[in-house]
């Protein structure tokens, strides 16, 4: 209010909108200054800024999610050609590899902190504590493990035996247990992708 009286300005930029008080801050600033909120950000970098949409903020506060903003961020971050190639591969029933997994993870990483992304999904308010504990460094560790593999191991993880796992663990600075966990989870994901690909084209299947 003092800033409006002393200097004057036309609009407001809200930053670091990743806490529980975000709604109160928006309402207070708008009411006290009489100026519109023009931009908002969940981070501190220029690429984190976006046009402010009050209805979307209300949706996040009410735990209805903010799918529109998530889609817009994805459109900016994802490589259309790469995404189309991945879709074609998936539809053809070709096996999902660790190389594909790494590419997908790097695209998601461009969207910003994982906790913020999950916060845009409907119903995530019920697990806010768990979401807030998600560490982006976990993704970095997974990327380090995959990058420590040979091209052959990435395309065919079945060849990753005990000695290979020990070498990968040394190369990525993690434990053998973490390598084992990643490989196991990948096989589960690969199985799920096969099942989903098998359902494509059937009536009623997404």
Image (spheres, rainbow, N blue to C red):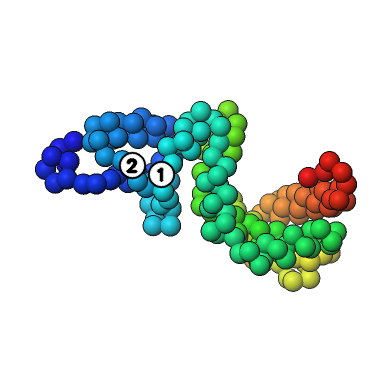
- Mark carried by residue 37: 2
Q: Is residue 204 above or below residue 21?
A: below
Asked if residue 2 shows in the view, the reply is yes
Give left or right: position of 96 versus 128. right
Element at badge 1? loop
Element at badge 2? strand
Q: Please name whichever residue, 157 or 123, is drawn nearer the observer in this view of the structure.
A: 123
Task: Find the distance from the CA under tag 2 to the CA under tag 1.
Answer: 7 Å
Task: Indicate the position of residue 34 as horizontal and vertical percent values.
Answer: 25, 35
Quarter occupied by residue 29: top left
Identify residue for label 1: 52
Give left or right: position of 39 versus 132. left
- How dense is the environment of label 2, judged by Cα within 10 Å: few (below 14), some, or many (20 and up)? some
Give left or right: position of 118 versus 185. left
Q: Please name whichever residue, 53 or 14, is drawn nearer the observer in this view of the structure.
A: 53
Q: Please name whichever residue, 205 or 145, is drawn nearer the observer in this view of the structure.
A: 205
Q: Please name whichever residue, 163 or 140, is drawn nearer the observer in this view of the structure.
A: 140
Task: Indicate the position of residue 38 as horizontal and vertical percent values.
Answer: 35, 46
For the C terminus, the image quarter is: top right
Q: Is residue 138 above or below residue 67?
A: below
Asked if residue 124 shows in the view, the reply is no
Task: Indicate the position of residue 32 as horizontal and vertical percent values.
Answer: 24, 32
Q: Earlier in the sequence, mark 2 or mark 1?
A: 2
The residue positioned 66% from the left and 54% from the top of the image is: 175
Give left or right: position of 139 versus 61. right
The residue positioned 43% from the left and 57% from the top of the image is: 47
Q: Are marks 2 and 1 in contact (CB under 8 Å)?
A: yes
The residue positioned 76% from the left and 53% from the top of the image is: 186
The residue positioned 18% from the left and 36% from the top of the image is: 1
Which residue appears farthest toward the bottom when viewing the image?
A: 151
- Mark carried by residue 66: none
């Amino acid at each position: 209010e003092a800033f409006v009286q002393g200097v004057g300005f036309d609009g407001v930029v809200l930053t670091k909108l990743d806490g529980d008080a975000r709604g109160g801050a928006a309402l207070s600033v708008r009411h006290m200054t009489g100026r519109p909120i023009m931009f908002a950000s969940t981070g501190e970098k220029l690429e984190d800024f976006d046009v402010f949409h009050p209805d979307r903020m209300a949706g996040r506060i009410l735990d209805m999610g903010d799918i529109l903003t998530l889609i817009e961020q994805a459109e900016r971050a994802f490589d259309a050609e790469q995404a189309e190639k991945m879709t074609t591969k998936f539809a053809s029933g070709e096996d999902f590899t660790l190389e594909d997994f790494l590419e997908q993870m790097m695209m998601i990483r461009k969207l910003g902190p994982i906790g913020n992304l999950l916060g845009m999904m409907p119903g995530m308010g019920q697990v806010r504590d768990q979401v807030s504990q998600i560490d982006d460094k976990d993704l970095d560790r997974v990327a380090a493990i995959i990058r420590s593999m040979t091209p052959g191991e990435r395309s065919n993880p079945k060849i990753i035996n005990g000695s290979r796992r020990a070498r990968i663990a040394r190369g990525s600075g993690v434990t053998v247990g973490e390598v084992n966990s990643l490989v196991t989870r990948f096989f589960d994901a690969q199985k799920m992708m096969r099942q989903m690909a098998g359902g494509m084209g059937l009536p009623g299947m997404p």
